[in-house]
Image (tube, rainbow, N blue to C red):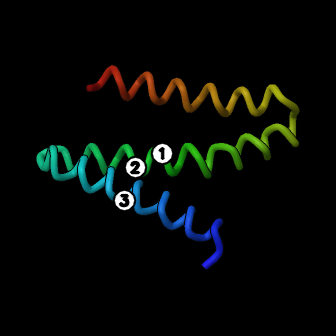
Amino acid sequence: MSGEEAEKKRSEEVVYQKIEEALLAMPDKKNEVSGLMIMGLFGGTVFPLIMGFASDAIGQVGAVAVMAVGVIYLFTYIRKL
């Protein structure tokens, strides 16, 4: 295993450990923790892709519009909590 692969494995282990700690510390909040993980995944993978397509189609305004929709959704969601 190369140094880069070992570092990646260590960082993955840290992430899994933190998720486990969060779930063990607040077992009654499992759904919220899972939701935050999915939101992080979606925000880090899908949104940049959509922003790229929007930027290619109509320029930087498209990317900003996609980001604005995400922010508005989050603010709406926060108000419901």
Above or below, 25 relative to 11: above
* Residue extending furthest toward the bottom: 1
User: How far apart, in angstroms, are the residues tagged by discs 3 and 1?
Assistant: 14 Å
Q: Nearer the viewer, residue 11 or 47?
A: 11
Residue 70 image-quadrant placement: top right
The residue carrying mark 2 is: 37
Q: Name the residue at 21% across, 51% down.
A: 23
Residue 16's label in the rendered image is 3
Proximity of marks 2 and 1: CB atoms separated by less than 8 Å:
yes
Element on which disc 1 rests: helix
Q: Name the residue at 48% across, 45% down.
A: 40
Of badges 3 and 1, nearer the viewer stands 3
Residue 40's label in the rendered image is 1
| Amino acid type, residue under disc 1 in the picture | Gly
Q: Name the residue at 54% across, 26% down.
A: 71
Above or below, 15 relative to 3: above
Q: Would residue 6 be found to the left or right of residue 15 on screen?
A: right
| Amino acid type, residue under disc 2 in the picture | Met
Residue 57 image-quadrant placement: top right
x then y, percent, for residue 62: 78, 32
Residue 43 image-quadrant placement: top right
Q: Would residue 81 be found to the left or right of residue 24 on screen?
A: right
Number of residues whose C-alpha sits closer than 10 Å to that of mark 1, classed few (under 14), some (14–19) or many (20 or more)? few
Above or below, 66 relative to 68: below
Number of residues whose C-alpha sits closer than 10 Å to that of mark 2, classed few (under 14), some (14–19) or many (20 or more)? few
First in sequence, mark 3 or 2: give its number.
Answer: 3
x then y, percent, for residue 58: 87, 34
User: How far apart, in angstroms, are the residues tagged by discs 2 and 1?
Assistant: 5 Å
User: How far apart, in angstroms, are the residues tagged by discs 3 and 2?
Assistant: 11 Å
